[in-house]
Structures are given as C-alpha cells and as structure tokens.
Image (cartoon, rainbow, N blue to C red):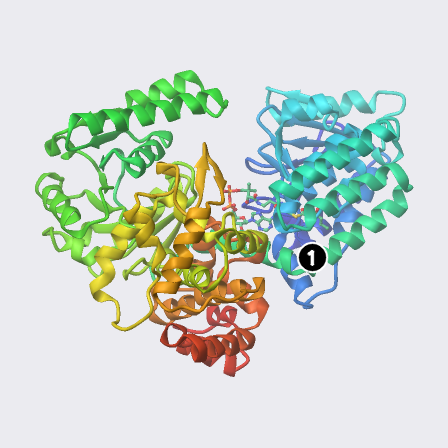
Amino acid sequence: MPTQALATYAIHSDVAVITIDNPPVNAFSPPVIEALMTHLAAAQADSSVQAIVLIGAGKTFSAGADITEFLKYASGEKPFDDGLHRLIFAAEDSTKPVVAALRGSALGGAVELSVGCHYRIADSRTQLGLPEVKLGLIPGAMGTQRLPRLCGIAKAAELCATGRMCGAAEALEAGIIDRVTEEDLLPTAISFAQEMAATPNPLRKTRDMTDRLGEATENEAALKKLSQLVSQKARGQIAPQKAIEAVGLAATLPFTEAIERESEIFQELLLGDQSRALVHVFFGERAVAKIPNIAADTTSREIKSAAVVGAGTMGSGIALTYLAAGIPVVLKEVAAEQLQRGVETIRKQLTASVERGRITQAQAEQQLAALTPTLDYQDLSKADVIVEAVFEAMHLKQEVFAELDRVAKPSAILATNTSTLDVDQIASATRRPESVIGHHFFSPANIMRLLEVVRGSATSVEVIVTSMALAKRLSKVAVLVGNCFGFVGNRMFWPYQREAQFLLEEGASVEQVDRVLADFGMAMGPNAVMDLAGIDVGWRVDQERKDSLPEGLRQPLVSSKLYELNRYGQKTGAGWYRYEGRKALPDPAVQTLIESTAQAAGIERRTITDAEILERTLYALVNEGARILAEGIAERPVDIDITYVYGYGFPAWRGGPMMFADTAGLQKIYQRTCHYQEIHGPWWEPAPLLEELAKGDGKFADLAQRKR
Ligand code: 3H9
C-alpha cells in the first residue's frame, strides 16, 4: 500500500488539512509517520498554506503508537524507531502554525504529538489519556516533558503515572488543550488555525515553556504523595514510578537532556518482562474474542430481553449487568421474601452507583423500571436469554432447566451460571441441549470483567457466537472454555487452594500464605479469597464432587471444619480470619484449629519458607493449566491467562499463569514439580504437556504456533 494512503492531504482555502487514516484506531505505524512527515513537508513548501490542521479520519484522532511495533523491538526483530520523535519535532518546527484537532480518543503518542503541535482543539466528547503505564511503559515521545510544561508537574505526573483518561473539559481547564468545541470539528479547527496564523507570534512551542512547571517544594510533595498512591494501587509495577521519575525531570534537567532520559527509560521498560506481559494481556483480551474454527459469518440470535432465575448475590449481580447494558430483565425467585431481597439488593446497588457518580438518577430509575420481579416461570416465556443462578447443586439446577425447557421460547438461550458443575448433565434435563451453555459470571457479577462461556458437547455454534457477542454488550471479557469440573478457572484454582491448605497444615500461617501471594501480585491471598467467596460455597462444591475424586489421596482438612463451625468467611464475620467490618484480623482460634487438625492427622509441622509457598501454589496452578490445554478445555494458553487476570486477580504485569510459567522457565517448573511429587505423591504428577515442553526446551507460548 502506498504510504500516502495512510494519511491524506487537502487544502481548505489557506489551510492544509492532514488526515491520519489508518483504521481502526489511526495508530502511528512507521508508514503512517512517514506519510505524515511527507504531508507536513508539502505544507511547508506550499506558499498558499498559512496554517495546518492535523486530524484523524473516522471517529477518533489516534490510539497512539502502533503497539505491534513494540513486539518487534522487544523480540529483537527490529531496532527501536524514533520516528514519532521526528514527526513531533517536524510539527513543532513547522514554520506555519499546526493545530491538532482531537476527537474520539487521543491516547499515548497521539497526546504527545498533539502537545508538540502549536495548538490543540478538541470535540467536547474527546477522551485524552497517557495509558502507557497500562502497557508497562511510560510516555516515550516527549510527553513526560511537554505535558508538565502545559499543565504543571503534579497534574502531568498524575496522568502519566495512572494512565487515567481525562475528558476535553478537564484537559482545557488544565491547560493541555486550548479550545473545546461542540460544533463540527474540522471547520472549527480550520477557523481556529486561521485565527492563530493571524496572531503576531503564532508558533507556540511547548519545549520552550517553563512558566507553568510549578513551584519546587509543592512539586516534590505532590510527586511523593503520588508515588505512595501508585505503590498501593499499582502494587508491584515498575512503570508508574518510572513515569513519576521522568515527569520530575522536567524540573531538574534541560528539555533536551530530559527527553533523552525519558527515551532511555521507555526503551528499558519496553525490553522488560512487565511490559511484555501487559502487552500480552492487551492483545490477549482481544484475542479471546476471536474463536478459532468458527466461521466469522456464523449467524447469531437476537437478544433483546433477559431473565435471571435466582435473586441471590449472583442472580442480582447478573440482573444488574443486563440492566446496565440496557437489556430488560425478568427476575425469578421461588418465594416472595427472597425475591424482595433480590430487588432490594439491585435497588441499593443502583443508588450506590448514583452516589458514586457512575450513573445519573434518571438512568438508575430507567434501569429499575426495566426489572420485572416474578415468582412464576411462565413470565420467562418471552426472554431471549435465561440465566440460571441458583445454588450449586445438580438436582436443583436440573429441576430449573426442566422448567425452563417447558416455558422458554424455542429460540431462547438457556444459560447456567454454574461455577463447577457438568453443563451436559444440566442440559440433559432439557429437550434442547443445543441451546444450553454455561455463562459463568464472577462475583460481584456486575463488577468483575470475566465471563467464562462454557460450551457443552451439544451447544450449537450459533449459541456460542451469540453468547460471545452478548458478553461484549455486557462489557465483559468472555473466554470460551470446555466443559469439565470447574472449567478453566475453578479447576485450576482447586489445586492452588489445595496446596495453600496443605501448607497451613504443614506449618505456614494463614497470614503468611496470603502475604506471600499478595506480594507476588495476586489481588488477594487464597485464604482471603475463600473468605470472600464463602467457605460454605466451597464446601457445597466439595460435596458435589467428593464421589468423583480418586481414593486415597490427601485432602485438605481444615476448611470443612470451618464450615462445621459456621465460619463461612466475610458473610458470617469469621472464616480463615475474623472480621471487624470488612477488616480481616488474624484469629488464634483458627491457628489452634489448624495445629490440632494437623496433629490428629499425623502431619509433622515445620517452618515453611516463602519460596515454598510460591512454588507449591503457583506450580500446582500451572501444572493443571497444562492439563487443561492438552485436553482442549482451554483452546490456547492466552485463554487461561486472560481468565486468571480478569477473574482471579492474577497480576496482569505477570501476563497470567501460563506466561508467568514461560517467564519462570518450564524446565525449572517441571523439575520442581517432580521434586514435590517425590515428597507429596500423586497430586504432583507432572502434566504430560509440561514434561514435553520442558524436555523440548519449549514454552506454552509455542503452542499458539502449533496446529491443534
Ligand atoms: C504509545 O503511544 C507509546 C508512546 O508514548 C511512545 C512511542 C515511542 N496499536 O480495543 P479495540 C487495535 S503506547 C496497535 O478492540 P475499542 C486492537 O488490537 C500506545 N493496535 O477497539 C484491535 O485490533 P483487532 C498507547 C491497536 O474501540 C483494534 O485496534 N495507546 C492499538 O474497544 C480495535 O481495538 C494505547 O495504549 C494501538 N495503539 O477501543 C491505546 N490500539 O481488531 C490502546 C488498538 O485486530 N488502545 N489497536 O483485535 C485502546 O485503549 C483501545 O484500543 C481504544 C479503542 C480505546 C483505542
């Protein structure tokens, strides 16, 4: 494709309009940069041109640098290309004023280009942001030095270190942009450019500005506070602190030296594991939506209305998710009291959303009006999708599905929110197993982004495709998985938690295990997770599963004792911890229970190292992941990674369990798995795929290249 096609050049009276035209998001690939450079040069050479407007084709300005290029640099395929620097300097050194006209999104390098232009005007709905930290990077095209010159060091550091988006009005107030318009952007930008060209000194260069950098002691205090904040919010991540460091250089180094340092930091981060992992997650989130072996033109069913069976915590969360997406919901319960409780939960959540400014009062009222509570299955007959969210017991689920089969219209999708049970067995209660599928939401269902879409053996392709598209409407990240105990997420979580409990029995404390895994980057330690999810929930799952477990294998002993003591976790104020409000406190009674249980079972207690905790929990997770891949329950390693990052609080900056394993080294993991097998027996049998990859010096990532 000729480079010129990626950006167009047109003259509107005396203004040159250069349009970035690289769908879908106008990313700055090297050819786009070259095309823009060519057009900028043409505008300099054309004596009839008085000013230049830079705009994006379509709905958006640009999503910044082309992230696919980073992969080539990180893998050594290509040297680092400073094309964006050259382009920004070309704009700034233009002899005619350059106006960046922003709309849609202006992200990363796109903001950096715009702040290198002489002026900026934005459509009032534009969102601006420096999201590089979300890719484990810092702004690397002079943004850390130009932004503070426009809006001050404190504000610039906050934007660069958090990656937070800001709207046009905020950007205007901060001084990042010069004008906001409600009018048609292009003609308004052209008029603005003409107006600026007519001023006495129209070439305003950000690099020369120093008056807005702010006062030294205030800046230092602001940066220190920000550093503390991001060390909590972005625990374990390097890039946010580096972003603060880079922005801080605006106060201490001349522009040219500071941009060199910025570029060094950017390139160091680009070669680091954290950026590699976060870029993997960025593309992974998009990859899981593309299902291998399903034709792109497969028809999907129309979803205009939904029903949810069960108004408990999960059911009401699922109903809220549909309501937020503008899909009306019929909510079914067995008794008036439970139904009323569910409706109240939904009402309270909506009120809380209004209070937090997430939605308006009018939107909350509209959503509540779209909720129809009922006790009658017959009221579900018009729903396009019905999600069952009753207790985790097969007989109950089958009863519900038999009813759904009776009342649901023929085209309805019948989804189960089971987190562990056999979807085929549930489907067998109907005469239409092709319409039955798992929609496994994660608690709180209206907040957590993951949706495991579980395909049963009879589930039709149409139902799968509809579910994946529906998930997008519900703002979920959907991962298609196969049917087995616990699917991908909970099946892998079981050995992880099993080892966590064994470690307690062998001598670790509840707090030690949780601290070690939280320090690794998990959102919560395994014991705290159990307390949140409900020890009773886990117990119920264990009851359903116990007959299918191999005999003679060691089983965790303490959690069922907590269940017998009615210590269900946060909901009863006590579980692995005791709770004051939501604050978890160590409980000596639990320690005593663990010790007496271990003694009664003849388990010798010893000092457990942090390293052993990490290995035994994480390698057990990875080993099960390898089995899941070999069985095709997860199609690709990235499906597991995204499941864990979005559903289980696995640190995105480690890329998910399978990428973590590749980074740690499969040979090491395999050797340690064999070592633990010698000590602890069959639970630790290495998965054949792990063994094969380790012995062949391979990686899970290689599987993506293999034909299944
Ligand atoms: C940067 O600028 C570094 C500089 O500081 C320094 C350089 C020296 N590149 O998300 P969607 C693809 S770092 C390449 O589904 P949406 C995406 O993979 C960059 N590709 O759409 C997908 O491809 P596919 C800082 C990109 O409407 C398609 O576009 N910028 C890029 O839901 C559609 O994307 C960011 O971090 C890119 N930059 O959301 C912005 N962006 O169709 C990252 C997207 O094959 N991007 N693609 O799956 C986003 O946040 C969202 O994509 C955006 C649109 C909000 C723009």
From what the image shows, is residue 600 above or below residue 126? below
Please provide percent x and percent y for residue 634. Answer: 37, 63
From what the image shows, is residue 25 above or below residue 165? below
Q: What residue appears at the point 26 percent right and 71 percent down from the top-left corner?
A: 550
Residue at image mark 1: 270
Q: What residue appears at the point 73 percent right and 22 percent down from the top-left corner?
A: 192
- For label 1, the SS is helix
Q: What residue appears at the point 79 percent right and 52 percent down from the top-left corner?
A: 263
- The residue carrying mark 1 has its beta carbon less than 8 Å from ligand 1: no
Please provide percent x and percent y for residue 80. Answer: 74, 60
The image quadrant of residue 330 is top left
Q: Is residue 167 left or right of 479 when viewed as pictured?
A: right
The image quadrant of residue 545 is bottom left
Q: Nearer the viewer, residue 694 or 410?
A: 694
Please provide percent x and percent y for residue 65. Answer: 66, 49
Whether residue 97 appears in this view of the structure is no
Please provide percent x and percent y for residue 462. Answer: 26, 52
